[in-house]
């Protein structure tokens, strides 16, 4: 059984709201959301389409800023960081699996995974070794020298996951990371994320599949931009 996580949270959202637009056209994507994820913990977020799940991840990763409230990740108030410091924090400590992969078409798989490490000053040879290790961990070492257009949807998904794991990522944010995968491959990815969590990372996972939420320590349910329930997950489908 996974030990209970302890210590300060690696991610804390405090009364976070996000409103897009102004006046009568304003849309409230999140309203007063508070959430913590501690080192060694995997938290799943579920909810219907339009409930604010992806907005929550974007705020947690510093890709967007809240209209109200605060987001603290890896000890830093993301709203208070200058852009360059925010970018450095994300490269070094936050891994993000995008729903649409966000791979650079002109770079090979290994070059896509290497890029954040090279931008952080790691020499190319060392960055390539780390990237190859991450690709192997995600089960796609054999596609290292192929370009994204030469990969299947599932392979692109795994490359994106490898990019989120490379280096010393303390916080991993995953937006439907199993969306392009069949059930056995999805289970492999959840096992990988669970392993990273058990090794001390904090993982926040957005999923619509109860099967994959069953790998989590807690499940947070969103509806209309607000947290409506939080429960401990019941392992399903062979999870843990």
Image (tube, rainbow, N blue to C red):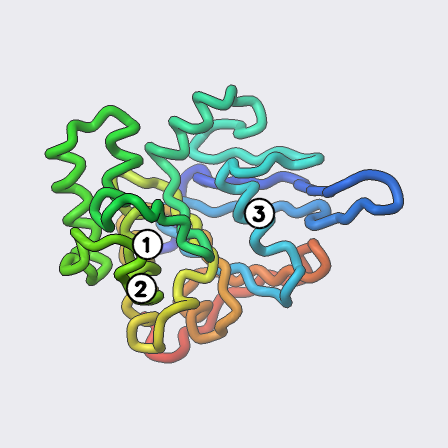
Placement of the C terminus among the 4 image quadrants: bottom left
Element marked by disc 3: strand
N-terminal of the pair, mark 2 or mark 1, is 1
Instruction: Return the residue at label 3.
Output: 35
Measured Cα–Cα span from mark 2 to mark 3: 24 Å
Element marked by disc 1: helix
- Confirm whether residue 16 shows in the render: yes
Placement of the N terminus among the 4 image quadrants: bottom left
Instruction: Return the residue at label 1.
Output: 161
N-terminal of the pair, mark 2 or mark 3, is 3
Most foreground residue, 159 or 219: 159
The residue sitting at 52% across, 33% down in the picture is 72
Tag 1: Cα neighbours inside 10 Å, few (<14), some, or many (≥20)?
many
The residue sitting at 53% across, 28% down in the picture is 77
Tag 3: Cα neighbours inside 10 Å, few (<14), some, or many (≥20)?
some
Q: Which mark is residue 189?
A: 2
Measured Cα–Cα span from mark 2 to mark 1: 8 Å
The residue sitting at 50% across, 59% down in the picture is 206
């Amino acid at each position: 059984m996974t030990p209970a996580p302890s210590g300060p949270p690696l991610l804390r959202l405090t009364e976070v709201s996000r409103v897009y637009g102004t006046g009568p056209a304003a849309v409230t994507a999140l309203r007063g959301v508070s959430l913590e994820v501690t080192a060694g913990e995997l938290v799943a977020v579920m909810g219907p389409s339009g409930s604010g799940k992806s907005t929550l991840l974007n705020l947690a990763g510093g890709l967007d800023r809240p209209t109200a409230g605060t987001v603290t990740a890896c000890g830093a108030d993301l709203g208070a960081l200058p852009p360059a410091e925010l970018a450095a924090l994300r490269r070094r400590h936050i891994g993000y699996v995008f729903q649409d992969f966000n791979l650079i078409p002109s770079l090979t798989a290994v070059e896509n995974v290497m890029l954040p490490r090279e931008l952080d000053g790691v020499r190319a040879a060392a960055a390539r070794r780390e990237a190859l290790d991450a690709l192997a961990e995600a089960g796609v070492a054999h596609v290292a020298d192929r370009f994204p257009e030469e990969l299947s949807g599932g392979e692109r998904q795994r490359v994106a996951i490898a990019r989120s794991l490379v280096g010393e990522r303390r916080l991993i944010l995953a937006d439907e990371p199993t969306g392009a995968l069949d059930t056995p491959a999805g289970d492999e990815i959840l096992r990988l994320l669970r392993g990273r969590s058990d090794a001390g990372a904090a993982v926040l996972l957005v999923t619509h599949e109860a099967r994959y939420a069953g790998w989590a320590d807690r499940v947070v349910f969103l509806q209309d931009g607000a947290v409506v329930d939080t429960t401990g997950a019941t392992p399903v489908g062979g999870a843990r």
